[in-house]
Every structure is written in structure tokens, then in C-alpha cells.
Amino acid sequence: MQIKPNFPSGVKLLSTPRYLEGGASIGNYDNFNLATHTGDIPDAVIHNRKLLITHFDLPNTPKWLNQTHSNICLDAQSNDCEADAVITCEKGVVCTVMTADCLPIFASNQSGTQIGVAHAGWQGILNGVIESFVMQFDERDLLIYFGAAISSKNLEVGKQVLEQFIFKDKKLSAAFTQTGKKYHLDIYQAARIILDELGVKTISGGNQCTVEQEKDYFSYRRDGVNSGRMAHLIWIA
């Protein structure tokens, strides 16, 4: 779906739907899976990636990353693909991450001349992907949009995860709620806390749930290891 946050007019954002007319994936991947690493039929993914370009009239082939929950942020012009965030200053270069519960973070400077997107699951947040991503920008007065991610209600974690977040920053304890012996992480709130510490104030989005909105989104927690993936794309037109 085309996203229309308060970004500069020349910056285009897109989060792909789970279903798109003409999508070729079947079974658990029904029907617009864009990931090659989750067990889907390779030809179906190739078809879907071609459909992505033509249906949404992308200016170029997306920069596909090999995501590992790292803190690595690449320039899109790099030949490397091992990263969890990507930025560019070049027009027509399509920065891309894929998710199925993790938080996609879109970013642009105020003038729309530098943009990017990050893949921020709880592991990536602990590893510092948000800090690494923001530090690649030439300015901190950024515009941020949160794409769809898992809600706190559905993101149950162990006490060890809570302790790791508090060790990283005590303020992150505010992103957790406890019910009995169970802890729930609000990944949106954790990202907001980190962005606030970095001086980033203008944030929108963050009100979707990939688990509960089954018709709209893939979800690893809901669908299991063979879940499909959505793509989140940003470019300068």
C-alpha cells in the first residue's frame, strides 16, 4: 500500500500487501511473498518481485538485503548486501527491507535529499540498528514513519530480553509491561525511546499489528517459520 506520511513530496514510500492480484505464491505464502529464504517456490518469488516493479511502477530494481538482525547500515550504491538498514541520496534508487513482525523504520531528512529504511526487530534494536541507521544521516532533524509491526499484546518475551534492554538503556524499561511472569515488549515504544535519545522527534505511524491483521500482513509469530515477507521500499522520485 502506498504510504502518505508527512514526508517531502519527492519521497515515495511503499509497504507491500500480503495479497496482490497476480501474486504467484501459494499455501502459507499466499500470495505476494517477496522473500527467497523462507521456503517458497523460487519461481513464485521471482514472479512476485517482477510484479512488484511493474505494478507499483518502481524506478529501479529494489536493493534487496540479506538481513541478519545486525546493526549494519549500507549505502544503497554499495555492492554489499549484508545489512539491516540502507540509505541513499540518489534519485530513483529504491531502498528496501523485508519484515514479518519486525519494525520497518522509514526515514527522510527535511529536504527529502537523503532517505532510507531499517529493519528493526527486538534483536536488531538491542544490536543498535536504529542508532547505526540514524547516524548515517547528515542531520538529526529527521522525519520517521513506522510501518506495520507486531503489537505489544502479541510480542511476549522472556525476562532475559527485558534485562538486556535495561542493560542497553534503563529508559527502555518503559517499553515493557508485565502480566504475571510474562513480559510484553512494545517494539514501537522501544524505537521511539531510542529515536528520542538520538534527537529525532518527528515520528508517525506505529498503530498496526501484523499478527492480528491477517488479511493485510504476513506474521512470523502467527504463521511460523514458513511465513512470507512484506517489502518496505523508499525512494526519491
Image: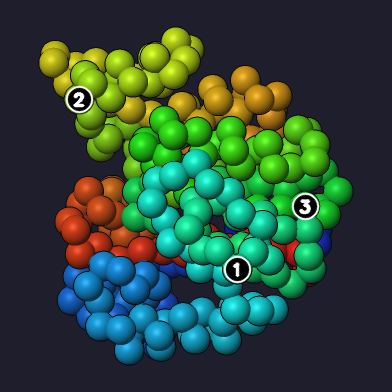
Q: Which callout, 1 or 2, points at the residue further toward the start of the chain?
A: 1
The residue pinned by badge 1 equals 79
The residue pinned by badge 3 equals 114
Front residue of 207 and 232: 232
Q: Is residue 170 left or right of residue 233?
A: left
Spatial distance from mark 1 to mark 3, Cα to Cα? Answer: 19 Å
Query: How would you rate the neighbour count of disc 3 (Cα within 10 Å): few for under 14, some for 14-19, many for 20 or more?
Result: many
Asked where in the image residue 96 lies, by quadrant, the reply is bottom right
Q: Which mark is residue 52?
A: none
Return the x and y of residue 60 as percentages of the image width and height: 66, 79
Numbered disc 2: secondary structure: loop
Return the x and y of residue 70 as percentages of the image width and height: 44, 44
Residue at 48% from the left image edge and 58% from the top image edge: 82
Spatial distance from mark 2 to mark 3, Cα to Cα? Answer: 37 Å
Image height check: is 144 above or below 50?
Answer: above
The kind of residue tagged 2 is Gly
Residue at 50% from the left image edge and 41% from the top image edge: 71
Front residue of 162 and 205: 162
Numbered disc 3: secondary structure: loop
Asked where in the image residue 167 lies, by quadrant, the reply is top left
Q: Quadrant of the C terminus?
A: bottom right
The furthest residue to the front = 79
Return the x and y of residue 203 as percentages of the image width and height: 64, 35
Spatial distance from mark 1 to mark 2, Cα to Cα? Answer: 37 Å
Image height check: is 51 above or below 196?
Answer: below
Residue at 25% from the left image edge and 76% from the top image edge: 40
Front residue of 29 and 194: 194
Query: How would you rate the neighbour count of disc 2 (Cα within 10 Å): few for under 14, some for 14-19, many for 20 or more?
Result: few
